[in-house]
């Protein structure tokens, strides 16, 4: 009897994200550029962070890839749109122009900006976060990913990850995500749509 896990015991969320990462990385390789930009959007709990980390771990190009999470840019619980705009202006636009981008991490405990980080335009870049895909940012991303997942699954994953610190803000954040979807239709801007159970 084999001690290896059966295929049926594989977590379907992990399997969906691993499979999506493979397809996205094939597209990255097919671009034939040294410093591609990958944008990953989706509602809270959809799997953006997990997917982005999988992309970094399996990155197909030589050298280092940079990863920026919008969780480090949102200026608090009402800052979804402002975080996405900061990513566009401070990270994506300079990268596209071959200039070093500089952004400041938001310290959630102190409710203020903290240390600065630089983004090297010569290196590949992955940016992930809710609210990221807009008409303005889409023009700056070579690969654009939208993650779709059922509300109950997303909420369960997000709250098990962040627990009581997120629970009081779930509805407040979800309203901002809904406004983003209504205003920007991020799914239509994506080059890859990933269905996550």
Image (tube, rainbow, N blue to C red):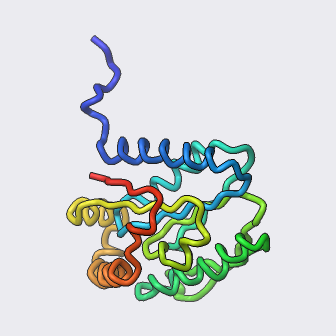
Kindly identify the residue that appears in the image at 61 percent across and 45 percent down: 30
In what quadrant of the picture does the N terminus appear?
top left
Where is residue 19? Give x, y as percent: 42, 42
Of residues 155 and 193, the one nearer the viewer is: 193
Could you say which quadrant of the image residue 161 lies in?
bottom left
Query: In this rendering, would 86 be left or right of 41?
Result: right
Query: In this rendering, would 46 be left or right of 189?
Result: left
> Residue lying furthest left in this view?
152
Where is residue 105? Give x, y as percent: 61, 77
Of residues 189 and 177, the one nearer the viewer is: 189
Where is residue 13? Give x, y as percent: 32, 48
Kindly identify the residue that appears in the image at 49 percent across and 73 percent down: 132
Query: In this rendering, would 64 be left or right of 7?
Result: right
Could you say which quadrant of the image residue 16 lies in?
top left
State the count of labels.
0
Kindly identify the residue that appears in the image at 43 percent across and 43 percent down: 18
Kindly identify the residue that appears in the image at 26 percent across and 66 percent down: 155
Q: Is residue 168 above or below residue 36?
A: below
Of residues 21 and 5, the one nearer the viewer is: 21
Where is residue 63? Give x, y as percent: 74, 47
Of residues 103 and 132, the one nearer the viewer is: 132
């Amino acid at each position: 009897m084999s001690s290896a896990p059966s295929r049926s015991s594989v977590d379907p969320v992990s399997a969906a994200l691993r499979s999506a990462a493979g397809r996205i990385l094939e597209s990255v390789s097919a671009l034939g550029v040294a410093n591609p930009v990958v944008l990953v959007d989706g509602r809270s709990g959809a799997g953006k962070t997990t997917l982005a980390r999988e992309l970094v771990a399996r990155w197909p190009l030589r050298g280092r890839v940079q990863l920026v999470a919008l969780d480090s840019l949102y200026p608090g619980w009402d800052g979804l749109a402002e975080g996405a705009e900061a990513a566009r202006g401070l990270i994506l636009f300079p990268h596209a122009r071959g200039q070093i981008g500089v952004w400041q991490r938001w310290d959630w405990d102190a409710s203020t900006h903290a240390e600065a980080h630089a983004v090297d335009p010569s290196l590949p870049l992955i940016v992930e976060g809710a609210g990221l895909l807009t008409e303005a940012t889409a023009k700056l991303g070579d690969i654009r990913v939208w993650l779709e997942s059922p509300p109950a699954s997303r909420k369960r994953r997000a709250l098990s990850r962040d627990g009581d610190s997120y629970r009081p803000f779930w509805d407040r954040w979800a309203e901002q995500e809904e406004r983003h979807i209504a205003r920007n239709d991020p799914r239509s801007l994506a080059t890859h749509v990933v269905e996550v159970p």
